[in-house]
Amino acid sequence: SGQRNSNQVRAPGAYLDPCYIEDHIAKFKTEGAGFIVVKSWTEGGNPAYTTLPPRKFVGLRSDMDAIVAAYKASNDDWSILVDRLNLGSSTNLSCDEIYYVKIAGNDSRFSFELPTGNEGGAIKGEWVPGGRTGYGIREAALVGSQAIVHNKSIATFLNNFPSNYEQIRASSVPDLADAFNQGTTKAQILAEFAACFDGNGQRNSNQVRAPGAYLDPCYIEDHISKFKSEGAGFIVVKSWTEGSSYTTLPSRKFVGLQSDMDAIIADYKVSNDWHILVDRLNLDPTTDLSGEEIYYIKIAGNDSRFSYEIPTGNESGAIRGEWAPGGQTGYGIKEAALVGSQNIIHNQDMTTFLANFPNLWEKIR
């Protein structure tokens, strides 16, 4: 499966000439080093990773300067970065905001060693021994890199390297208003959605086309990465659960981005006005929560039970007159369809429901 096992590559000192090793490291101490930082990799991904990895791979400053110069001269051919930095053949930087970070050779926070191949950044099929990439870039393991804290924020990351970074590529992620592909408008998708209901407001067999058919792929990727990073949240009304004819969550349940949901719940707690929940969560306008017991559920972005997709409008939770395309409610809450939600069993019992989310729920009403 290509996953790491417990085997280790022997240390470079066991198979390389000591003079070669000394000369290699001396170059880094003299010139310094450089590496690229991709914003989405920093702010997305596993929420547990809030620092640089230990022994991060860095390139010799002169070699890195040459690669970045070639990229700048290429009219945004980001494949130069992928190929020459051995980032992996499947890496796609077409949507990404990218920075080039430089490290002085005498930066007291770090030291340099020859990579062993046991580092997290050593990619199967890419890494080669001796401190040179397949492209010939001289590289080192940055000892002490794990002390660089970014807390999933590119601004915090860059503050660790004042005056020693530059943005070399701007983000290609459009705002939602500009994310609709040429020839398609929001109004057209809403018309498709309206056609999914009969004259009595009941669902018919019509379907809205998939978001990938009308939204910019960079917008979709960025939207989903936010959920993978932050996680999500949703409210649960006890009477809806225990009075339901269903024993599980619906498939593709709508959830909000956790930061957006946290803000709504905070406003509700201050006001104690349940209308805030109805209005901001785009619940059916006729919904009355005045006598209800309500819980707020949080889902970690890396919860392996689930994945996230842009809502299509074909979900049962897409309400006529409320749903809008693009993964954003009329109030501006970022939303996603929770893939795998139908596997959450509650058997019409609130205690059973909450047991699916230990330590990730709170009673708010």
Image (cartoon, helix red, strand yellow):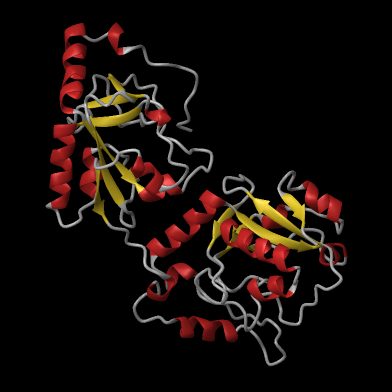
Give the image location of residue 322, x and y in percent. Answer: 62, 80
Residue 61 against residue 310 in the figure, above or below: above
Q: Quadrant of residue 275?
A: bottom right
Q: Could you tell whether 265 is left or right of 4 in the image?
A: right
Q: Quadrant of residue 182?
A: bottom left
Image quarter in which the C terminus is found:
bottom right
Residue at x-position 59% and y-position 81%? 206
Q: Could you tell whether 110 is left or right of 344 in the image?
A: left
Q: Which residue occupies the extreme bottom position in the image?
A: 199
Q: Could you tell whether 16 is left or right of 171 in the image?
A: left
Q: Which residue occupies the extreme front position in the image?
A: 270
Residue 216 against residue 160 in the figure, above or below: below
Give the image location of residue 313, x and y in percent. Answer: 58, 74
Residue at x-position 87% and y-position 67%? 243
> Is residue 41 visible to the viewer in this orientation of the structure?
no
Total numbered badges shown on the rendered structure? 0
Q: Looking at the image, which is closer to me, 349 or 89?
A: 349
Q: Looking at the image, which is closer to me, 287 or 274?
A: 274
Q: Could you tell whether 235 is left or right of 347 in the image?
A: left
Give the image location of residue 24, x and y in percent. Answer: 18, 18
Residue at x-position 37% and y-position 29%? 145
Give the image location of residue 291, x and y in percent. Answer: 87, 71
Residue at x-position 43% and y-position 36%? 149
Q: Quadrant of residue 118?
A: top left
> Is residue 357 visible to the viewer in this orientation of the structure?
yes
